[in-house]
Image (tube, helix red, strand yellow):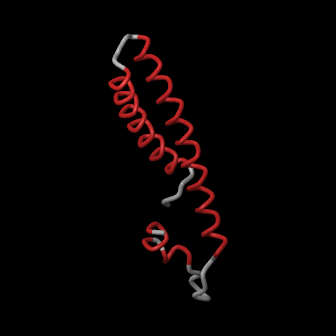
Amino acid sequence: MLFYKDNKSRYVHPLTGKKSSENIKKDIKKLFGTFSISEVIFVITKLFFHYTLLQLFVQPYQALTIAELIAWGVFLISINIGIKVVELFK
């Protein structure tokens, strides 16, 4: 919703002044796809690091916390790269 509010001018046809629902749908699909792929990357990264840290005999709560922090970092990087790849902001 905030993205739409900030970018209202992109979704209004310049000649008619009407909303271009096609552009809105296209951008929502891009956002959904990017977030979905990044979420899968997050889960895989978290599971991998959690398992690896447990194999290294790190305490379970510490392993979970470290894996979560690493996964969040990877998630944020992947979401930013994903948005650039789908060219959401031109």
The residue lying furthest to the bottom in this view is: 16
Q: Is residue 59 above or below residue 5?
A: above
Label total for image: 0
Task: Give me the residue at 53% from left, 58% from top.
Answer: 88
Seen from the viewer's position, the closer of residues 89 and 35 is 35
| As drawn, 52 above or below 5 | above
* Picture quadrant where residue 21 is located: bottom right
> Residue 65 location in percent, x, y?
35, 30
Image-quadrant location for residue 37? top right
Residue 84 point in image, percent of width and height: 49, 49
Q: Position of residue 77 (x, y in %)?
A: 42, 40
- x 45%, y 74%: residue: 5
Residue at image coords 56%, 80%: 12
Is 60 positioned to the left or the right of 33 in the image?
left
Which one is nearer the viewer's eye here, 12 or 25?
Answer: 25
Residue 31 rendering spot, x and y as whole percentages: 56, 56
Residue positioned most to the top: 56
Relative placement, left or right, of 20 versus 81 is right
